[in-house]
């Protein structure tokens, strides 16, 4: 049997980070088994399913590098087919019209609450003849759920899970206005799309029991289920806005690389020995459902940032520069060819320190503009710092441009430090402060070299002349 999975998001305005992980697991499972990954947009909530909300899903998946097979299915367009199956269930006696009034339902609710019992419809129209229907009333159609025994699911992640059928009432499958309900539509679509494995969040487990019963009633082959635990925040509560961003595009804007986020999401709830850095090729080779954890994984921003730093360091400088440009442009900088060249040459040093593209852009700023001094840099340039700066400016002025390389500059500074009986760090820290505006940066000698003699000295001189009392 070849594997067919699907990712079935409901448009909410963005691709939720948890949904992105579900998509990733489905995608890896399909690719691992050389099966198919289908996409179904569950757009029956017409108010929420705007063009932008649907596009956000496509864009989010594309950014993450998750593709799908075949044309995406739009659930709303299949409504007629869902109604048809409801009619079929009626015809085979597995569904029935229910004429309960809102008042009656309210009464049932109140009674259940008073007794501290779960709220359930009491099946009062299950065996009643439609002849007894109040004239002109529009019924809902309810599913004839089994009333005895248990429904048991052998979940590929959760193991055996079961519910007593008494707890599941006869759910509505067609509303009074004739529109189908969610649990019917999902089953019909999954069946018609030939889905063999349903991999989704474990918040759907209660739906699964009901859906399982519909498969049984229709005599359809039941797919395998794998319910993956949801993502929680560091405090153990379900991931929500207060923990941080939920939409995938926010992670893009914070400067995470899709490779890093994908690696992180993969490890969030799935493991392969002690491997932390996992390439896509390895992920496809290794992914299985056996090693998906049963308990919720906690989202760890520090781990994500570290992983992102790794992928930034590993990336080719040219590719990184292309990604960096929009982040620099957000700072209202226009990058002329000279600036791009400086960034490119500075990339080796810059990328060692940045955990996100936002950080990389911040750290790279000094190559393309005269930086403002941060608090630490200002502190370094106290009276003593300024004296050291002047001293070094003098020495550097007389250093020949033809020998202006990182190595030569470093040797030169070492010699001066020795002569003056100063630590090298102490001697060059004021240079760093003026050149970069910060106390931490790539090597000062690398920066001097990349900026070149002229630019470097101008920067130092400008600072000195505006700070002479
Ligand atoms: N549309 C549902 C959601 O976004 C998923 C349904 C399913 O996977 O069966 O949570």
Image (cartoon, helix red, strand yellow):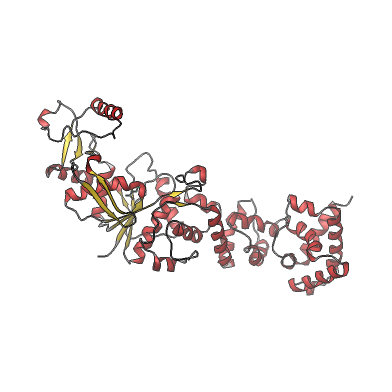
The structure residue drawn at horizontal position 65% and vertical position 55%, both measured from the top left corner, is: 362
The quarter of the picture where residue 6 lies is bottom left
In the image, residue 127 above or below residue 465: above
Please indicate, yes or no, whether residue 15 appears anywhere in the rendered image: no
In this view of the protein, can residue 224 be seen by the observer? yes
Position of residue 245 measured from the top left corner of the image (x, y, whole percent): 51, 47
**Quadrant housing residue 110:** top left
- Residue at point 79%, 58% (across, down): 430
Tell which residue pokes out farthest to the right in this image: 469
Q: Quadrant of residue 445?
A: bottom right
Q: At 62% across and 55% down in the image, what residue appears?
A: 359
Q: Residue at x 61, y 53 (%)?
A: 329
Q: Nearer the viewer, residue 377 or 270?
A: 270
Most foreground residue, 246 or 348: 246
In the rendered image, the vertical position of residue 151 relative to residue 130, given as above or below? below
Q: How many marks?
A: 0
| Residue 99 falls left or right of residue 311 | left
> Quick check: 242 left or right of 77?
right
Q: Position of residue 59 (x, y in %)?
A: 44, 53
Image side of residue 157 versus residue 179, left or right: right
Tell me: residue 353, above or below residue 202.
below
Please tell me which residue lies in front, 337 or 47.
47
| Residue 260 on image: x %, y % | 51, 60
Relative image position of residue 420 (x, y in whole percent): 88, 67
Q: Quadrant of the N terminus?
A: bottom left
């Amino acid at each position: 049997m070849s594997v067919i999975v699907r990712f079935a998001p409901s448009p909410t305005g963005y691709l939720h980070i948890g949904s992105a992980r579900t998509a990733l697991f489905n995608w890896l499972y399909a690719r691992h088994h050389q099966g198919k990954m289908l996409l179904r947009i569950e757009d029956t909530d017409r108010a929420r399913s705007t063009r932008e909300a649907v596009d956000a899903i496509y864009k989010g998946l594309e950014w993450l590098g998750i593709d799908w097979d075949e044309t995406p299915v739009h659930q709303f367009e299949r409504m007629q087919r869902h109604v048809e199956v409801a009619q079929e269930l009626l015809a085979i006696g597995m569904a029935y019209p229910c004429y309960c009034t809102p008042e009656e339902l309210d009464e049932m609710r109140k009674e259940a609450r008073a007794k501290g019992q779960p709220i359930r419809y009491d099946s009062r129209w299950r065996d009643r003849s439609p002849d007894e229907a109040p004239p002109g009333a529009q019924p809902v159609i309810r599913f004839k759920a089994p009333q005895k025994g248990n429904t048991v699911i052998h979940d590929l992640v959760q193991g055996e899970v079961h519910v007593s059928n008494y707890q599941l009432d006869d759910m509505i499958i067609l509303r009074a206005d004739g529109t189908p309900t969610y649990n019917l539509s999902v089953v019909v679509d999954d069946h018609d799309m030939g889905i063999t494995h349903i991999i989704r969040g474990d918040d759907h487990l209660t739906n699964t029991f009901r859906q399982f019963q519909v498969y049984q009633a229709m005599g359809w082959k039941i797919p395998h289920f794998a319910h993956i635990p949801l993502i929680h925040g560091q405090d153990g509560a379900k991931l929500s806005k207060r923990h941080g961003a939920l939409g995938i595009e926010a992670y893009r804007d914070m400067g995470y690389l899709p490779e890093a986020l994908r690696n992180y999401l993969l490890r969030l709830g799935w493991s392969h020995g002690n491997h932390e850095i996992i390439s896509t090729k390895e992920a496809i080779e290794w992914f299985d459902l056996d090693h998906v954890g049963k308990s919720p994984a906690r989202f760890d921003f520090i781990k994500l940032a570290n992983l992102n730093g790794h992928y930034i360091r590993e990336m080719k400088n040219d590719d990184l520069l292309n990604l960096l440009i929009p982040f620099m442009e957000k700072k209202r900088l226009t990058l002329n060819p000279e600036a791009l060249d400086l960034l490119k040459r500075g990339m080796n040093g810059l990328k060692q320190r940045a955990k996100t593209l936002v950080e990389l852009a911040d750290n790279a700023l000094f190559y393309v503009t005269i930086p403002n001094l941060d608090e630490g840099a200002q502190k370094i340039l106290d009276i003593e710092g300024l004296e050291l700066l002047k001293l070094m400016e003098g020495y550097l002025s007389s250093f020949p441009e033809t020998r202006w390389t990182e190595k030569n500059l470093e040797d030169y500074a070492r010699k001066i430090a020795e002569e003056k009986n100063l630590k090298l760090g102490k001697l060059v820290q004021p240079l760093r402060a003026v050149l970069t505006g910060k106390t931490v940066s790539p090597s000062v000698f690398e920066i001097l070299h990349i900026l070149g003699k002229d630019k470097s000295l101008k920067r130092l001189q400008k600072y000195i002349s505006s700070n002479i009392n």
